[in-house]
Structures are given as structure tokens and as C-alpha cells.
């Protein structure tokens, strides 16, 4: 591939996204560059403080439990207070709690502050995802989420390497450096990111209580996606909890595990953007089925690994699944979320991963201790297969993106709602019988007369309360 082709591919991968997205992307990268605590917490507690491995595991579990507790609360804050205030509170609280953790010495105090760090650090996720959905055009969301996921992994890869050197100098320096980097994220958000939450009409404000957590729980289709996300998260978590234990019992050293798992970060940084260019306009149902099977059987193949090279090969398989699944699944979650309930819906999705981070270590430990690592990898294959079948069944009745292929959203650098251009043929696809005044989900609407000499604005078009899966502009009536 020539240099010109590479430059063109890179330009197409990053072009067309609003300026606000790149400030949000930068804050994500800075935040992950400073993610030292999660990397060296176990070493800090066992080597520097002299606590047992069991206590270190307890602290890690409390850190994860904090994330579970904050997921839903942060989602509600994102919808009620706004995306920007939630991000500012979460980032500022994280910076303060991480710095405080570095000065804790009593085991109870360490455990309590670790729980607080888990709460605050996890609280920003629903707000970030909701803001990204607000400011990025629907057809660009897979690409945007992929770029954000790439930033997360790039930052984590760099911080993981830096954490070892920082720990040799001073563990406290690592805590304070992470606190400083997180505070820098809050400053970027405060200075560069305006609020993106769509304005509500008086009617929507009066009906605000209708979009509560109960609404999310009663949304069977969405909760099905959350359940499948939990299954996939259980599988992917084994790369960090099951794989090192299994390799250790097989006689491999921590350095061997480090070499094998490093393949994961290298491949994500190298392949995330080009793979996303290949998949972004393809059928999400097929992508989620394929990625589920690749994840399950990628870990399943670990049962046959007997050398570092084979372990690295299995990592390649499930890393490819991760590259495909992450942006596709996140985009699906946004498409199934009502505009004014994105925070709560994202909070429920975040909860599925937080709970998986708690269950996965217990599951892998029990299975390996009682049955052996081969049973764990076989179970991963089964879970991946179940998730693939689940996606296939769940998405079978959903409309395809082709139904909205004619819709076009004009790009914008602001956070205002974009103007939607609707050609006659596209309107015929979305509203098959305009005379009946019905949209694809069967909801009666009033179809205003369209002036063919001027494209209608967002106020002229009806929007269903629950967007279908198809790539369709989120239209505000504000």
C-alpha cells in the first residue's frame, strides 16, 4: 500500500467528525494515559504495603463494586443534570479520591477509598457515551465509537508500560500523577465542551418521569441486548482474570503472560481503525454474531495451547472479536435508546460490564480450582455460541439500515441539532404510506406538507419515541 493511499485512508477515518468529538476524544486519551492505579494496585498492596493476595483481591472486588453502584446513578445524572455536569463531577471526584488513596495506610481506609475510586471513575462512562451520541451523526457513530475505543487502548498500553517505571520510583507518585491527569480531563471538559443534551419541549418535560429506570427495565428488546452484553463481557474478562491464572498453573511465568497479552493491545492499536473502515456500513446483526463466535471460540482454543506462540495466536482470535464487537455493540445501544433517556440506557449498559467484572473472577477461580482450566475455556466457547444465537434471534425482526439509506444529515461543527435533508424516495422508504400518517413502528403521526424547493428542518419531521436499529437521524422537536 502506497503512502498516498495510507494518508487518504487515515484522512477518511477521521474526517467529518465535529470539533466537540475530538475534545471529548482527547479527554478520554488523557484519562487513560494516567490510568496507573488499576495497573499496579495489586503490586502496591502486596509488595509495598505487605498485605496478602486475598486482601488485594478484596480491594479489587470493592473497586469493581463501586462501579456497579455508580453505573445507574450516573446514568440518571446524565439525563437530569446533563452530560457536562456529570462529567465534571465524575472527573473531579476521581482526581480527589485517587490522590486520597495514595495517602491511606489502614486496611479499612484503603478498602473504603478504593470503593470510592471505583464509584467515581465509573461514573463518567454513561455521560461520555451519551454525549458522543448527541454530537456525532448517526451514520458516523460506529467510526466515532471505534476511534474512542482506540484512544482507550492506546492510552492504557502506554500507561501500563509507564506504570512499572513509576512504581520503581514511587507508588505515591503514580497516584498523584493519575490524579493530575484526571484533573486535566476535567479542565478540558470545562473549557472546551458545552452541554450536548437535547432540549426538551414542554410536552417532553411534562412526561419526563415516563423515561425512568423502570422504563429501561421494561424495554425487553434493550434488556436482551444488555443480557447479551453481560455474556460477552464475561468472556472478554477472562483475558485479564482467567488467562494469567491458567498460564501460571501450566508453568508459565508472569513475563510469558505479559508477552501473550501484549498482543491484544498491539492489535487493537494497529487494526481498530482499518477494521472499522471495513465494517462500519455492514450488517450489525451479522457482525455481532460473528464477533460473539470469535470471542467464544478464541478463548476456547486456549484449552489446546501449550506454548507462548499458541497462546498469542488465541489472543489474536479473540482480539479481532473485540475490535469488531466494541464499536458495533455501542452503536446498537445508542440506536435503541430514546434521545432523552440516553443516560439511563447507557448506565444500564455500563452496569452489564461492571457486574461482569465482579462475576468473571469468581467464575474463573471456581472452575479452575474444581474442574481445571480446560472446562473454563470450554464454557467460554458455549457462552460465545449462546450470545451469537441470541443476537441472531433478537435482531431478526429489526429493520435494516437500507430502510434509511436515503436520509442525510448535514455535518455541523456545533452541538445544535442538524438540518435533515429528506429526498422524496427516502421519505417513501421511511413512511411507506404518507397518506395514512404512519411511521415504521405503526405510531400514527401527522405528516406536514413538504415544500420540494426547500429541505425541511428537524421541526418539520416526526420522530418515533424509540428509534429502530436502522441508521436514522435523532430528530429533536425543540
Image (cartoon, rainbow, N blue to C red):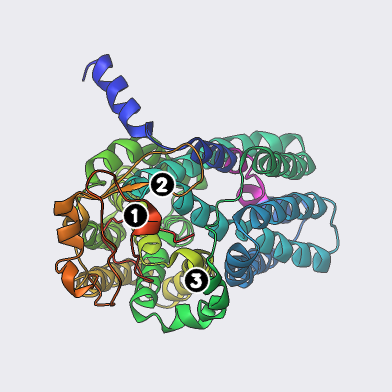
Circles 2 and 1, Cβ within 8 Å, touching? The answer is yes
Residue 408 locus on image (x, y percent): 28, 46
> Which residue occupies 43% across, 71% down?
368
| 26 up-or-down from 432: above or below | above
Circle 1 SS class: loop
- Tell me how far mark 2 sits from mark 3, CA to CA: 28 Å
Q: Residues within 10 Å of mark 3 (few under 14, many from 20)?
A: many
> In the rendered view, does 17 fall on the left or right side of 387?
right
Quadrant of residue 333 within the rendered picture:
bottom left
The x, y position of residue 12, in whole percent, is 31, 30
What residue would you read off at disc 2?
418
The circle on residue 348 is 3
Q: Which one is in front in this view, the residue at disc 2 or the one at disc 1?
A: 2
Q: Is residue 146 magenta?
A: no
For the residues labelled 2 and 1, the Cα–Cα distance comes to 9 Å
Q: Give the label on residue 473, or none.
A: 1
Viewport quadrant of the N terminus: top left
Residue 31 lies within the magenta run: yes
Check disc 3 and report its element: helix, strand or loop. Answer: helix
**Residue numbers of the magenta segment:** 30-40
Would you call the spot at circle 1 few (<14 residues within 10 Å), some (14-19), or many (20 or more)? many
Amino acid at each position: 500500500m502506497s503512502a498516498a493511499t495510507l494518508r487518504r485512508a487515515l484522512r477518511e477515518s477521521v474526517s467529518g467528525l465535529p470539533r466537540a468529538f475530538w475534545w471529548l476524544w482527547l479527554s478520554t486519551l488523557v484519562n487513560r494515559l494516567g490510568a496507573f492505579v488499576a495497573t499496579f494496585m495489586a503490586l502496591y498492596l502486596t509488595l509495598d504495603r505487605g498485605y496478602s493476595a486475598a486482601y488485594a483481591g478484596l480491594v479489587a472486588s470493592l473497586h469493581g463494586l463501586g462501579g456497579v453502584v455508580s453505573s445507574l446513578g450516573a446514568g440518571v445524572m446524565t439525563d437530569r443534570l446533563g452530560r457536562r455536569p456529570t462529567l465534571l463531577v465524575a472527573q473531579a471526584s476521581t482526581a480527589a479520591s485517587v490522590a486520597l488513596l495514595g495517602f491511606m495506610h489502614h486496611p479499612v481506609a484503603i478498602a473504603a477509598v478504593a470503593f470510592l475510586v471505583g464509584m467515581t471513575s465509573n461514573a463518567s462512562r454513561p455521560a461520555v457515551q451519551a454525549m458522543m451520541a448527541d454530537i456525532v451523526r448517526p451514520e458516523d457513530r460506529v467510526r466515532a465509537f471505534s476511534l474512542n475505543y482506540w484512544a482507550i487502548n492506546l492510552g492504557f498500553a502506554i500507561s501500563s508500560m509507564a506504570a512499572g517505571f513509576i512504581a520503581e520510583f514511587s507508588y505515591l507518585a503514580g497516584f498523584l500523577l493519575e490524579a493530575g491527569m484526571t484533573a486535566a480531563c476535567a479542565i478540558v471538559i470545562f473549557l472546551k465542551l458545552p452541554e450536548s443534551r437535547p432540549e426538551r419541549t414542554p410536552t417532553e418535560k411534562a412526561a419526563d418521569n415516563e423515561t425512568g429506570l423502570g422504563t429501561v427495565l421494561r424495554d425487553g428488546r434493550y434488556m436482551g441486548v444488555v443480557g447479551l452484553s453481560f455474556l460477552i463481557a464475561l468472556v472478554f474478562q477472562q483475558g485479564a482474570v482467567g488467562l494469567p491464572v491458567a498460564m501460571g498453573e501450566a508453568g508459565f511465568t508472569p513475563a510469558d503472560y505479559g508477552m501473550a497479552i501484549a498482543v491484544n493491545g498491539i492489535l487493537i492499536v494497529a487494526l481498530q481503525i482499518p477494521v472499522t473502515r471495513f465494517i462500519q456500513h455492514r450488517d450489525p446483526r451479522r457482525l455481532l454474531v460473528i464477533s460473539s463466535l470469535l470471542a467464544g471460540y478464541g478463548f476456547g482454543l486456549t484449552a489446546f495451547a501449550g506454548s507462548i506462540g499458541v497462546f498469542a495466536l488465541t489472543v489474536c482470535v479473540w482480539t479481532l472479536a473485540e475490535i469488531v464487537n466494541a464499536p458495533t455493540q455501542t452503536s446498537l445501544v445508542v440506536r435503541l435508546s430514546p434521545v432523552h433517556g440516553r443516560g439511563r440506557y447507557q448506565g444500564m449498559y455500563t452496569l452489564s460490564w461492571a457486574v461482569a467484572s465482579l462475576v468473571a473472577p469468581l467464575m474463573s477461580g471456581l472452575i479452575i480450582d474444581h474442574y481445571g482450566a480446560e472446562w473454563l475455556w470450554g464454557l467460554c466457547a458455549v457462552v460465545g455460541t449462546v450470545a451469537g444465537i441470541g443476537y441472531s434471534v433478537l435482531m431478526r425482526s429489526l429493520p435494516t439500515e437500507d430502510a434509511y439509506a436515503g436520509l442525510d444529515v448535514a455535518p455541523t461543527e456545533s452541538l445544535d441539532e442538524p438540518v435533515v435533508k429528506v429526498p422524496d424516495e427516502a421519505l417513501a422508504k421511511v413512511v411507506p404510506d404518507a397518506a395514512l400518517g404512519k411511521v415504521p413502528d405503526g405510531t400514527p403521526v401527522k405528516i406536514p406538507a413538504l415544500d420540494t424547493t426547500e429541505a425541511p428542518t428537524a421541526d418539520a419531521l416526526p420522530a418515533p419515541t424509540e428509534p429502530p436499529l436502522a441508521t436514522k437521524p435523532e430528530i429533536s422537536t425543540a
